[in-house]
């Protein structure tokens, strides 16, 4: 029973933050619920250079070599 009461109290507090346009507390509640911590969830992106970009493009742009709109399509048997 205590858990239901605490959940109801927390919900009322969160709703009052939304209604009162208190976004700082809203974001604080979201961080609390999601256990977000800027230092522990930091994502380091890889260093992207020209070689990486060119290799990536060569993989996904290889279809320009093929003519998918053949003027004389192959006839089925």
Image: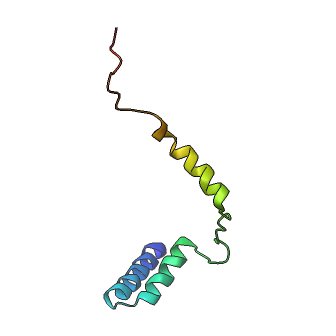
Colour scheme shown: rainbow
Image position of 23 with respect to 62: above or below:
below
- Quadrant of the image containing the N terminus: bottom left
Residue 51 percent across, percent down from the top left: 67, 56
Left or right: residue 58 versus residue 76 is right
Q: How many marks?
A: 0
Furthest residue in direction front, as rendered: 71
At x 43%, y 73%, the residue is 4
Instruction: Give the side of residue 41 with respect to residue 28, left or right.
Output: right
- Which residue is painted at 62% across and 78% down in the image? 38
Q: Position of residue 60 (x, y in %)?
A: 52, 46
Q: Position of residue 45 (x, y in %)?
A: 64, 66
- In the image, is residue 15 above or below residue 64? below
Q: Nearer the viewer, residue 41 or 31?
A: 41
- Residues 46 and 49: in front is 49
56 over 41 or under it: above or below: above
Q: Quadrant of residue 23?
A: bottom left
Residue farthest top in this picture:
77
Q: What residue is shown at x 33% (from left), y 12% (from top)? A: 76
Q: Nearer the viewer, residue 62 or 4?
A: 62
Quarter holding the C terminus is: top left
From the viewer's side, name the closer residue of 3 and 50. 50
Residue at image location 35% in from the left, 82% down from the top: 15
Q: Quadrant of residue 75?
A: top left
């Amino acid at each position: 029973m205590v858990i239901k009461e605490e959940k109801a109290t927390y919900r009322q507090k969160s709703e009052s933050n939304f209604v009162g346009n208190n976004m700082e507390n809203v974001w604080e509640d979201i961080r609390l619920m999601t256990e977000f911590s800027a230092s522990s969830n930091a994502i380091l992106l890889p260093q992207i250079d020209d070689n990486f970009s060119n290799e990536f493009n060569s993989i996904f742009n290889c279809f320009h070599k093929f003519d998918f709109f053949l003027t004389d399509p192959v006839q089925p048997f």
